[in-house]
Image (spheres, helix red, strand yellow):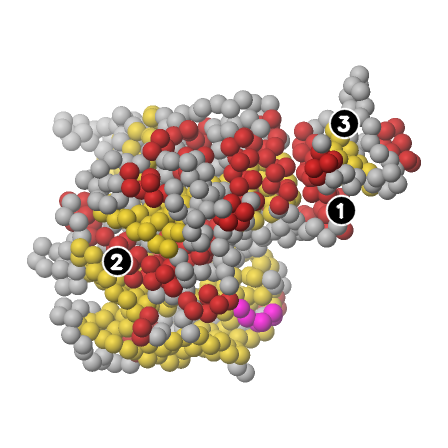
Amino acid sequence: MLVKRFGSPRGTVVADSDLPADYLKAAVLAVKLGYDFYPAVREGEEEPGYDPTFPVLWYGKRETEKRTAARQTAVSFSCIEDDAGLLNFLREQGREPDYLVILNSADLDRETARGDSLGELWVRGLSLNVLTLAVYREIFIFNVASDHPEAEEIEKTVNQTVCDLSLQLCFQAVLASPAVVPFFYEEKKAIGAVTEEMVRDIHVRLNNDLFFDLAEGRLMQNSSGGLSVQLISTRRYREIQNKLPGNGRRVLITATPHVESGIIFSTDEALIDTQLIPLLQDTNCQVQYLKGREANFRRVAAALAESDFFLFTGHGGPEALHTHGRSLYRDDLPLLPPLVAYASACSTVALTPHWHSPTEGLDWIGIPVDSRQVIGLSFVEKGALCYVGGATIEDLQYTTSTYSIFLEALLIKGLSVGEAVREIRNIISLYASTLLQKNPEAYRKYRWGTANAIHQQILLGDPAFTPAPGTPETRAETALPRQVEKTSSGWRITVEIPEERWQRSRAPVSNTSPSKYYYRCRSVEAITPYGEDIFSWGDYYRVAPDARNISEYAVKSTFFHLAVDLSPGEVPLKLALADAEIGESECLLCGQGVSCEGAAIEAMQKFRLPYLLQPPIELNMEEGWAFSTELVDGAIRMRWLVPLVLIDEKSRSASLLKRFIFTIDTGPGQRLSGRVEKAEAYHTFLISAGRRRLEGGKPAFREPLVNTLSAVLTDAGGQFAIDIAEDFVLTVQQQFPLYELLDDYRPFRRQTYETDNGSRLRVVLSPAEKVSFRGFLFDSLTGSPLSGALIRIFRGEPDPVEDPLIEAFVGEAGSGDKGEFYFNLAPGKYILYAAA
């Protein structure tokens, strides 16, 4: 029957091995080639026959009698002994793998178990689904093959394997439940009654720039059969869509459901109205929009059954999306069409229990979260092909407005789901890098938020799945008009913003106490053009607060993301704003038009950005515009951000950009390699290159570089390679948390390092000067000293509403018999917590 349905096999793959790892790789090879597959025959078992008139591919290292016989009788015989041999064979067949699958064949021998959380889930047989994936993806397998897997060891070995084999990858999927190939978990260091654990998945680095290289995803369900259906539906997506009503572009947006507790994110409504909906409508999307009290669980559930894409912005938790009236749980979900869902909500792919501590952090108790009830996983188990959601708390500054980047990448740019998630991560990295260059103190105030935002978005689904391939015609209509020209000194980029693209929408702030407490204004307005690569970020400008520190309304900040690919061998020497033209300007108090004082260039070069509920910070671009560099196909891609709404705080006015021109000066580059000595204890460092800043003819100490013209990360051993020009110097800073969770604070002296003749650079760090900080801990009721108390100290400071802005964990100590404690600390601001 198989031969009648599928035709005769074109050959035979034999796995002469006792290892399940080899069985899986050989079976996948048979699927890819359309061959028969035979496992090794153990003693006493009947040997299956195979036709020697077909090619035979032998997978295994042992030279046995059977292998010798097959070599002599088969019309064509090949032997594959290891991963290198397998890769060479695939390349000879013209099947270069671009998709890495990380699995653990140890799941073949363990039953499905319900854990106290999703992170403890071990599902039997998920790894067998690699055979289904091999039918339609060019995959390469990394098998953990361990009953006691460790995330750190897995990641180290995977990266070494990818490097040794020179794999040219685009996608990475972890085909395993979270206990079989585990995530990384932050150590719980909070002092308090409750806490969150920051988490991250396994990452593969192809280079050392500040941007993610691969589109990543997790393939898992509570049953192997359910995942099989998900993968088959992914492969057959077009055929399924042809049998469904609509055009495959039905978008359900559920935004800011009215809830009685918690912040109602009023900015979402304004941003969706101005940026997202016009863009979707211009590209033939059918949009259904539920918000406020309309966004109740019944209406949302009914609308999901008739949608291709789903965006939820609001509150969430491990087991539910918080819709109006009552939350939406697994049991409320209908059988879903093959949709893609994105939740801008907290913890909808939570991997850990609800942690609480009766002892304020001395020990922690986990309240179980049934893995079968986790709402993000429930979506794919009910029929969705992909779900993207947060593993922990969504950070208010970083991730509440990135949904527009995701949907734009999917529906307008035609990227895959994994690539769309990578776009979000790369924007966060670019924004953080810009802050680090132009206002380092502002960046350091919230390194924890940066790290969490980069890692916490988890994709459940095939990262290579592309639901809506883009077309040049679509992108020509949605992109802002721009012109990129090569000049004698580099490049010239002109961007125009048509007047008809500008939109505005004002949303009233909810009267609930948490909303008023957070926003400190009565309404929020978005003034923005719509189009590709436009997004809002960070905080909002509060216009003229009154005596109670409440403003009538606030204006959301808006950015344009630009990217230019340089020619091979070029390195950037300077990015400068050459010209700018302002369109309308208006008074933010009365709405009347005003004349713009001063030149547009000066207004753009020294703009102020609202940040972390504090007074706006300044990003001064007069010496050169901040940018970041990415390595793409052996050349440099420059990325930078441009503010589109310029606020003048003196006159309380806003100016809208009409046109701007940037120039890039470039020169020949050279590759410099080096090593930070004794780096193993510090994990990774950020290496920045640029021209030396002079103050009074002497090198500047606080900000040693005029501009950062190139930046890379070290690997775990301190190795790095960076593209530089002849007169560049280097600086070394603490970890930029791109691939790792936030490292502890370990300060060292800021220095510059010469780059002589492109030779290998050896960087030796000097310890920072420290002072002794001493104190005593007393009982607030009795006044008695507290001995044996736990004291933890973090680098950071509280924001205006007393939430901590954390740069890093510094250390801990116990109090002595008299309540005494001490730390050796570098100068700076710290937050101290104690529990007894």
What secondary structure characterizes most of the magenta part? loop
- Residue linked to disc 3: 40
Mark 2 and mark 1 lie on one chain; the one further toward the N terminus is 1
Q: Helix or strand or loop: what does disc 3 sit on?
A: loop
Q: Residue at x 36, y 77 (%)?
A: 659
Q: Helix or strand or loop: what does disc 2 sit on?
A: helix
Q: Which residues are magenta?
A: 565-570
| Badge 1 amino acid | Phe
Mark 3 and mark 1 lie on one chain; the one further toward the N terminus is 3
The x, y position of residue 33, in whole percent, is 73, 43
- The mark closer to the camera, 2 or 1, is 2
Pick the residue in front: 586 or 281: 281
The x, y position of residue 219, in whole percent, is 52, 38
Mark 2 is surrounded, within 10 Å at the Cα level, by few (under 14), some (14 to 19) or many (20 or more) other residues, namely many
The Cα atoms of the two marked residues, 3 and 1, are separated by 21 Å
| Badge 3 amino acid | Ala
Mark 1 is surrounded, within 10 Å at the Cα level, by few (under 14), some (14 to 19) or many (20 or more) other residues, namely some
Asked if residue 592 lies left or right of residue 457, the reply is: left
| Mark number displayed over residue 270 | 2
